[in-house]
Amino acid sequence: MTLSYTVGKLAALAGVTVRMLHHYDRIGLLEPDERTGSGHYRRYGPESVERLHRILSYRELGLSLDEIATLLDDPHADRLAHLRRQERLLRDRIGRLEEMVGWLLVIRARPAWSWFDNGPGPRDLRTPHARRDHIEKRHLGVSVTSDTLHQ
């Protein structure tokens, strides 16, 4: 007898919703190993559990469901190229998040009454060309640079 899980049990074990597993089934990303005669009850075996683990890992990295399907199903897919691309995207996002943290530190260092003046502020982060050098501002003797973001 092989170990298998109902959709509800697998969802609970994986920390996802039954609805998500139903969606993955509908789009062909994660199909159950067996269905009851009526088709309403799904059971997932060890291979499906492993596939779900890989799906969730790729989702955590920010890959789309289409990209994940390609990585898992296309034997000619260049997994390393996909992962390198995703690494670049994540590093870019980390840079933008560090800039946002820098602005928060700048804003916190300012007196509350000056948060709403016409000087530079968080709205500048919305521009696509926001750079680390924009963060280096001196307010009340506090210089925020990439070094101080990690302290």
Image (cartoon, rainbow, N blue to C red):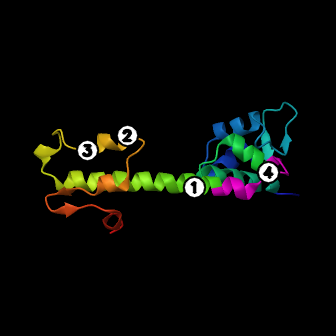
| Magenta residue check for 74 | yes
Please tell me whether residue 148 belongs to the stretch shown in magenta.
no
Q: Which residue is mark 3?
A: 121
How dense is the environment of label 1, judged by Cα within 10 Å: few (below 14), some, or many (20 and up)?
few
Please state which of residues 145 and 50 is positioned toward the viewer in this rendering: 145
Q: Which residue is mark 4?
A: 77
Q: Which of marks 1 and 2 precedes in the sequence? A: 1
Amino acid under disc 2: Arg
Q: How many neighbours does mark 2 have within 10 angstroms: few (below 14), some (14-19), or many (20 or more)?
A: few
The residue range painted magenta reads 73-84
Q: Distance of mark 3 from mark 4, alpha carbons?
A: 43 Å
Of 8 and 66, nearer the camera is 66
Which residue occupies 17% across, 44% down?
Answer: 115
- Which residue corresponds to the image point at 84% horizontal and 51% vertical from the top-left? 76
Across and down, in percent, residue 32 comes to 80, 43
Which amino acid type is shown beneath numbered disc 3? Gly
Q: Identify residue type, mark 4.
A: Ala
Q: Position of residue 124 (x, y in %)?
A: 31, 42
For residue 53, side relative to residue 116 (left or right): right
Closer to the chain start, of discs 1 and 3, is 1
Circle 1/circle 3 CB separation < 8 Å: no
**Alpha carbon of mark 1 to alpha carbon of mark 3: how far?**
27 Å
